[in-house]
Image (cartoon, coloured by chain):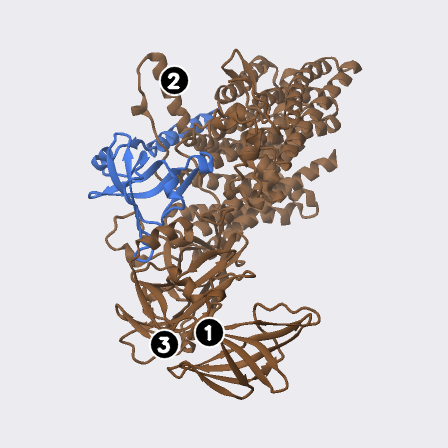
Amino acid sequence: MQDIQYIGEHLLPGRLGHFFVVTAFVSAILAVLSFRKATLNPDDLSWRRFSRWSWGIHAFSLYSVIGLIFYMMTHKMYEYKYVWDHTNDSLPFKYIFSAFWEGQEGSFLLWMFWHVNLGIAVLFLAKKWAPGVMTWLSSIQVVLVSMIAGIYFADNFKMGSSPFSLLRETMNIPLFTRPDYITMIEGNGLNPLLQNYWMTIHPPTLFLGFASVSIPFCFAMTGLWMKEHTAWLKPAMPWTLFSAGVLGTGVLMGGAWAYEALSFGGYWAWDPVENMSLVPWLILLAGLHANFISRHTNHSIKTTYIFYLMAFLLVVYSTFLTRSGILGEESVHAFTQMGLEWQLVSFIFIYLGLGTYFIVSRNKSIPVVKKEELMQSREFWMFVGALILAFSSILISFTTSIPVWNKLIDVYGSIVGKGDMTAYHKAMPIDPVDHHNRFQLWIAVLVTVISSIGQVLRFNAMGWDVHKKRFWKHMAISAGISLVLSYLLSLWIDLRSWQYYVLLMAASFGFVSNLTYIVSFVRQKFTSWASPLSHAGFALMVIGIMVSGLNKRIISENRFAQEGLAEGLNAGENAFLIKGMPMYMNGFWVTYHTDTLVGLTRKYAVEFLKLGEKGDTLEHFTTHPNILYDRKMTKVATANPNTKRYLDRDVFTYVAGLPPEKQDVANVEKIDSALDYKTFYVRSGDSIQVGEYTIRVDSLMLGTKHNGYDPIENDLVVSADVAVHPTADVKEKSADTMAVQSKSAVVKNKRTQFIHPTLFVRKGLLYGLSDQVNDYNLRVRLKASTIDSLLPLDDNLQYEPLVISQGGSIHWKDLLITMKGIDKKIDHPNYKAEEGDIAIQGVFEITGKNGITHAARPLYFIRDGRGLNMKAYIPDLALHIRIESIDPKKEEFHLAVAKSMADPKVAIEIAEKAPRNDYIVLEAILFPGINLFWAGSLIMLFGIFLGLYKRLRKA
Amino acid sequence: MPFLILALMAAGVILLISASKDMSTYNSFAQVKAASEPSKVVGILAKDKPMYYDAEKDPNLFKFFMTDQSGELHEVTLHSAKPQDFELSEQVVVTGQFEGDEFVASSILMKCPSKYKNEEVLVRSNM
């Protein structure tokens, strides 16, 4: 391809960006080297200064990279692939952050951003440990920067994916042969599922959590490296607590987001990406406990090393699983492959190698206590607890890594030359929730019980002979209270098998024991509440999980349809709701009342009513699930649930389906063209018979009552008032009786319904709005080609003069025209008053052949000395009236009247078997006690942060 | 303590073996039919074949056709609402079992290319 001179590209930001990425990379390498020197030569101030400068330059480079990308995004520079991929012209500014980290490069930058800030904090806070910790942190940064480097080696070997690549460099399409391609492109935009506030807060929190795991790891590696195996344990702990708190919050936010915005109705799905964000957190907690033990005794130092190393490696492994695309067929979060696999795998192995090397080579020098932990010591139980957490992680990772095992089998197969190994591949469990719960239930039992025991014991079993009485007393009281609590809860919770009874008792015990510990042992010292609060919070979480999971009820479930289905398969969780029609489901009367369009969102109002035996109201609320259209308003982009929250339960509602015509504008055309329309020519007042129904055109009018019509100025609108009723129904019920509905099963409405097929002219284009009676499956529209007779051009009319006075009547053709008077109050729709105007409207009544009287109010006004008028048009009579002039002396009005049709008829088209368009498919789930889960998790996190505060205060 | 660790490791191995029993495999329709227990089938959505969903008749009955990896075309029944934008998916992974000649899925994982940038949507029904 010859060199094309492209017009309008902004290449400077990209070039600057590349420059800063390279600077960040080089300065990170320099930081590693200089921090290392500073660690080995603590008294040499020059290395200290140089290393801090390196980090400063590294930080500045990364901030610049981030700033440049934001600049490119806010200025809509679609020549850059990253900007094109994640933004577009209509992206609301508040989602710019979400767009930034929607892609891999952005999330890597977010990770690096946090590392930079944490590094700065380390430099300020970690005192003598800073150089060592920073050596390791800088090394991690080197690897991370390489992920976005976008540097080519030897032609086809690429290191990293740069966010500054130009779109035309990454795609080879004919568009880029045009020098002015930039005027023709617009961005792809942010995935509609990510256009909410969660995408703004969850990733930064989660990534800060991930990034902060590096710090205890770096402390541990420094301790190993420098062979100082005890001194680092104290300064590291606050960082561990910070990390555990933030990462825990991040994971929980993910659950809250899933609960609020996703349709599966829950907060945790044991999805691989969810699992791999949880596992590092569990291992980090195990490390925290080991760290805690080693602070107070000399046990578990090696354990602490191993856990901190594993926690970091698992963060890297987690990012590998998420980004490499290896999860392909198994996860909702699986992203595209980016060609980064070899880098991500190397990332794991570099640190696995370094960690293993240092642990093995320093093994001899790590202090080990010969004496075993006593069973009556706190450290014994904490150690067991840490092992249980590790257990849990192994079980979760094992299943989650199935795609990795498959890949390894493939690698083995290719080495050994066995060929296609897909026969040996395994897939995820059929029911991952059931699978994981089976094991994690026992983990939860052990954690809640062990944490209670360990809490009340002392390190090194200090003073056991005296303390043991207090210990057993506490255990007995807690056991007693928790049995009562379990009993009470068992009345509420649907415990389906003995395992759940065990879990309930364990969780109750954990909750009660930790709280009574606070009351009996540490109530004076608030900061010492940290640990028992965390464990009580966790126990409460478990109770919340049990209630909301076991007592979960699908309100919208159709139990009657279960008949004849195999066991294990349900009839379905969705209900079909017709607008305005209450439907009884599982104790509730549910009515879909209205829907309102606000911007790109259509909000539905769904009312729930639960009546008691005496007809008293037990529950009454309305939820507002909504759907979001794409920016062209042609189809539904996504549906968002809405949850009614009570203190003791939540009702989750979600629009799972819509009529095809409401889902996608393309379906309107498709369905409409498949209908068989029959044309009828009728006069106002005439009735037609179609199928079982009588259709009567009551009148033709200007304007319309069609509620799908949005008025815009200068529209010309004509519509028909049409009444439809079953022919068999001789008595016509008035519209007022519609209000009273009998609460029985869905019955077809045997009453007259009124519809308003409409035609309107907007900016020279003709639009038709059909209307339908859903209950009768009838769709009616005005024949579009008759628009000229419905809204005839004034020039084509043959006006005839007519003179009339107020109060007078004249017969004209087959009409009786009576002038009632004049009205100074003007309501002519086309008239815009100007200063100096003198205007009046004539009040006329015109009676046609059939005796029906119509009103007409032609307008006459004087402006700048000229007499002007606006006509009144009665479509039913095809009559046009103008006031040409007024003779004030004779008190006569000179009219011009015209009849555009000798026999005014309207062409109406009717189709039977029109599919309903007035329903929603609703999913409604009841989650009792779910607030216990949120409350428990918040208490747990509060406990962790309280622990952090305690240690910061001490320092 | 070493005894405890050994005991835990033994328990761990036993649990992992138990866990691995839960693993499933990707099969073809023919294999699933023969096995008569739930399994997963990976395949391509047959877009030229009709998809059935009539919310008014039954909001929880959705049928479509897919071709498994052995090339066999078969209809899949899902007792749930039609997932949004289902027509856009290309590759689908269904989990389910045969009831007579009917393949009834308990969940579908859809892969929608380009529009959602290769992200995937998991539809879980009745879980």
Mark 3 and mark 2 residues within 8 Å of each other at the beta carbon = no
Q: Are marks 3 and 1 on the same chain?
A: yes
Foreground residue among B35 and A301: B35
Residue located 43% across and 77% down the image: A736
Residue A568 visible somewhere in the drawing: yes
Could you tell me the amino acid type at mark 2? Val
Q: CA distance from mark 1 to mark 2?
A: 89 Å
Q: Nearer the viewer, mark 1 or mark 2?
A: 1
A690, above or below A91, in the image: below
Residue carrying label 1: A898
Q: CA distance from mark 3 to mark 1?
A: 22 Å
- The disc at residue A411 is 2
Q: What is the letter of the brown chain?
A: A
In the displayed structure, does residue A656 sit left or right of residue A858?
left
Between disc 3 and disc 1, whose residue precedes?
A: 3
Q: CA distance from mark 3 to mark 2?
A: 81 Å
In the displayed structure, does residue B62 sit left or right of residue A448?
left
Residue A410 locus on image (x, y percent): 36, 20
Residue A181 locus on image (x, y percent): 55, 30
Could you tell me the amino acid type at mark 3? Gly
Foreground residue among A761 and A880: A880
| Subunit bearing disc 2 | A
> Can you name the residue that lies furthest to the bottom here?
A807
Residue carrying label 3: A685
Residue A863 locus on image (x, y percent): 66, 71
Q: What is the letter of the blue chain?
A: B
Between disc 1 and disc 2, whose residue precedes?
A: 2
Could you tell me the amino acid type at mark 1? Ala
